[in-house]
Amino acid sequence: MQSKIEDGDLVVRIPLAECIEAARKDLERKKATALLSAREMQIFEMMRKNLVHKEIAAALGVATKTVKTHATEIFRKLQCESRAELLYKFGFDGEAR
């Protein structure tokens, strides 16, 4: 990504490949919204923020086993084998651990 000032305005140039990848992930997230229940969507977004099952369970006030069950269903609906694949397909929205 390049940025510079032109005629007093900040101009940011983002490589086309990055724009296409960001648009693809955004589209995938929109498709996911249509497939997942409201609770699954909550858990999906928390997983994208790099929260583990125990943290998600505490935040939602449910058992860890409940979160694991929802995660399994999320993986099935979104055709992912793992959390890593989920983050690759739908983007990472948190801090590295």
Image (spheres, helix red, strand yellow):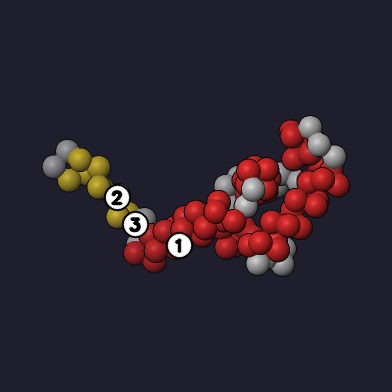
In the image, what residue type sits under mark 3?
Ile
Residue 81 is left or right of residue 26, and the answer is right
Q: How many marks?
A: 3
Residue 26 in view of the camera:
yes
Q: Residue at x 81, y 36 (%)?
A: 62
Q: Is residue 27 above or below residue 67?
A: below
- The answer for how far apart the CA atoms under marks 1 and 2 are is 20 Å
Residue 44 is left or right of residue 18, and the answer is right
Q: Is residue 97 above or below residue 16?
A: above
Q: Secondary structure at mark 1?
A: helix
* Residue nearer the viewer, 19 or 5: 19
The label on residue 80 is none
Decide: marks 3, 2 in contact (CB < 8 A)? yes
Residue 84 in view of the camera:
no
The residue beneath circle 2 is: 12
- Please provide percent x and percent y for residue 93: 57, 47
* Quarter of the figure with the N terminus: bottom left
- Please provide percent x and percent y for residue 34: 55, 54
Decide: marks 1, 2 in contact (CB < 8 A)? no
Structural crowding at the residue carrying mark 2, measured as other residues with C-alpha within 10 Å and reported as few (<14), some (14–19) or many (≥20): few
* Residue nearer the viewer, 84 or 2: 84
Q: Residue at x 45, y 62 (%)?
A: 24
First in sequence: mark 1 vs mark 2 = 2
The residue beneath circle 1 is: 24
- Please provide percent x and percent y for residue 51: 71, 44
In the image, what residue type sits under mark 2?
Val
Structural crowding at the residue carrying mark 3, measured as other residues with C-alpha within 10 Å and reported as few (<14), some (14–19) or many (≥20): few
- The answer for how far apart the CA atoms under marks 3 and 2 are is 6 Å
The label on residue 14 is 3
- The answer for how far apart the CA atoms under marks 1 and 3 are is 15 Å
Residue 20 is left or right of residue 83, and the answer is left
Q: Secondary structure at mark 3?
A: loop
